[in-house]
Image: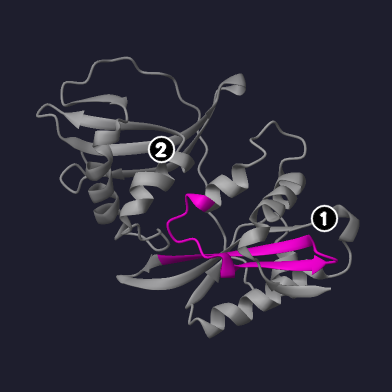
Amino acid sequence: MEFRALKQTELHMWSNLCNMVFNKNSENDPHSFLQLYENDPWKDQNNILVAVESGKIVSTVQIYCRFTMLGTQEIKTGFIGGVCTNPDYTGQGLASKLLNHAVDLMRQNEFHISMLTSGIGSFYERLGWQNVQWHWKTMSFAIDNTPCEDFTVRPIRMEDIDSIRFIHSEHSKNFNGPIVRNNDDYWKQKIQIENKTCWVAVDTSGEIIAYLWLYAREEDNYICIIEYGQSAFTRGGM
């Protein structure tokens, strides 16, 4: 078994493995992982680690290099994702070996912190990650169609991106963890691939004063707020 970084010629093989493991019961685009990689402005194939046997990729781990806000500082962060193994090769500790390799690689490249989300936290705790509590709020609501005189709400347009980018930059400084999105390509490319439904609030002068990204599931009227931001001038008034 060979453990190393992915080669350029293996991108499709890697994408096929991820799709087989994560999308086996869905109708998602079979090339979705490759598309996400290609549209990542921070992509680096050296951050995709693989276990290879007889020329076949059987396990993989990906490091997403980002900068995140912590206090008022921007810190280099390695997000772990795409951890998967071919079902025929599970139980051999391949993912664990790749994750340990990923930790060594992040240390060599002077990452300050590593983060991930998972439903099997105990597995990652054994490898050195620490569990951090997430806080969620759920609520029931009714649709309010009362007209508002101060602002209107409409779907996002591509010409809104610069305004949203500015609001995100200012709003995210108040929290720990937001990704620093100072890359032009992110806003031009990646956001168009990753976004769900997005709405903006526009004041009477036509200025965008807030935005909201959400995921809506019509079959059970479920809505999840993915991200939001509002202008400093509107805080407390919306």
The magenta span reads 38-67
Does residue 191 lie above or below 110 as drawn?
A: above
Residue 51 falls in image quadrant: bottom right
* Marks 1 and 2, how far apart at CA: 34 Å
Q: Residue at x 49, y 61 (%)?
A: 43
Work out whether residue 9 or residue 77 is closer to the camera in this orientation and state it: 9
Residue 172 figure quarter: bottom left
For image coordinates 50% across by 81% down, the residue present is 109
Is disc 2 placed on a helix, strand or loop?
Answer: strand
Amino acid type of the residue tagged 2 in the rendering: Trp
Of 113 and 141, nearer the camera is 113
**What is the number of callouts on the image?**
2
Residue 24 percent across, percent down from the top left: 77, 39
Q: Would residue 65 be counted in the magenta stretch?
A: yes
* 194 left or right, relative to 182: right
Residue bearing mark 1: 86
Which disc, if any, is residue 213? 2
Considering only order in the chain, which callout, 2 or 1, is on the residue closer to the N terminus?
A: 1
